[in-house]
Image (cartoon, helix red, strand yellow):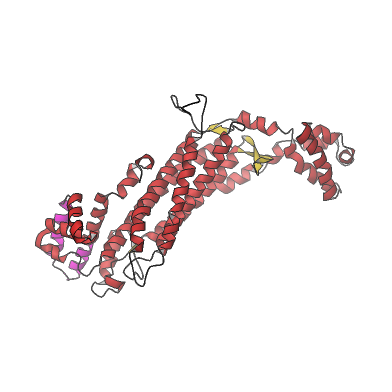
Amino acid sequence: MIPRYSRPEMTAIWSPETRFRIWFEIEAHAATAMADLGIIPEEAAATIWEKGRAAEFDISRIDEIEAVTKHDVIAFLTHLAEFVGADARFVHQGMTSSDVLDTCLNVQLTRAADLLIADIDRLLAALKTRAFEHKTTVTIGRSHGIHAEPTTFGVKLAQAYAEFDRNKSRLLAARKEIATCAISGAIGTFANIDPRVEEHVAAAMGLEPEPVSTQVIPRDRHAMFFVTLAVIASSIERLATEIRHLQRTEVLEAEEYFAPGQKGSSAMPHKRNPVLTENLTGLARMVRAYAQPAMENVALWHERDISHSSVERMIGPDATVTLDFALNRMAGVIEKLVVYPERMQANLDKLSGLHNSQRVLLALTQKGVSREDAYLFVQRNAMKTWNEGADFLSELKSDADVTKHLSAAELDEMFDIGYHLKQVDTIFARVFG
């Protein structure tokens, strides 16, 4: 985790203090369940809760113990025993390290997912507000980077809204997928621990019991989670790339907010660069990179190995912290995005109405002209506009093959911008309801 690209709410989930507190809660809830089942004394469970809840776990002390034991869970349990006393012998009864580690990781991932869902909600709200603001702001649509037909800037933002709404649904599903608990003991057979302990801990921690844990929670769940984060990051990059293109000097239809006192270049005082969306493009690459090792973690040896462990210690914090930062940065970009409708209109007018070429083509075919001939008639006039800067409508009116089938009034009507926008309300209704 790099502080530059981190927010404190998400970073706190991955702190050692949080991790050890979750470990304690898992152990304490398990002790409660065992006391209820008569496996350990009720007084012992009460002492574990009382002493552990009041404890201020010393990270350096745990590290000191681990330096000797070479085992992080044993180091924590040894330190916990220093607070609990003699009743610490009832902690971790019948459990294995993965019961604590895997359940804790899934608690952290579900908490991270909750923050990410809130982040997406912020971005969705910004996209919706700006989409309705520019619902009828006409702009040229582009395919291959080349002028195509008109759309509105609101429709562009509505597309982004629909995409992130799908991402929210994916993340909700990924959260459900990852929210499982394993308290099943060595090899996951419950030989030394009652399954009802797992059920109690799962309910207490907001999770569901893992059906078959084989000592570890299956990593296909984690792969799904991190792949979902990667898809969301890709959507961020798609939107960021659109903004970067629109901010190019030759286009300049929209740009990132440029704050008073902000500097764009150490050498060129005139510069206003799309630094935020460029940054988001880079962050998206990193989040996607974490998906590959998560998928490789699925194939563990037999009932378990720990080849996944070192990976998850890195990608768990890094992927969620980075995506949390990126979603909030993107929301801020959209909230403050500067839009230039006049420039959109100027760019739309650059090719003298060529964006109406398909409408003329279709009209000719409806008048009985073959599609091949209609395409030829329209294209030869379009190329005069493209190559010589001629007015497209004037050229069409001067072409006998065209005017043989379409009157001047009919051609004029085909250059009405409203034709291209007549279904904007339908699109908005589909997206926003």
Comparing 280 with 166, the one in front is 280
At horizontal 60% and vertical 42% (from top left) the residue drawn is 155
| Magenta segment boundaries in residue numbering | 29-54
Left or right side of 51 for 192: right
At horizontal 33% and vertical 67% (from top left) the residue drawn is 305
- Where residue 272 appears, as percent x and y from the top left, is 51, 29
At horizontal 55% and vertical 38% (from top left) the residue drawn is 243
Q: Residue furthest front?
A: 267
Q: Judge whether residue 81 is colored magenta.
A: no
- Where residue 288 appears, as percent x and y from the top left, is 46, 52
Comparing 169 with 229, the one in front is 229
Quadrant for residue 220, please give it.
bottom left
Quadrant for residue 145, please give it.
top right
Number of marks drawn: 0
- Where residue 7 appears, as percent x and y from the top left, is 35, 42
Q: Main secondary structure of the magenta part?
A: helix
At horizontal 38% and vertical 47% (from top left) the residue drawn is 321
Q: Judge whether residue 39 is colored magenta.
A: yes
- Where residue 153 appears, as percent x and y from the top left, is 59, 38
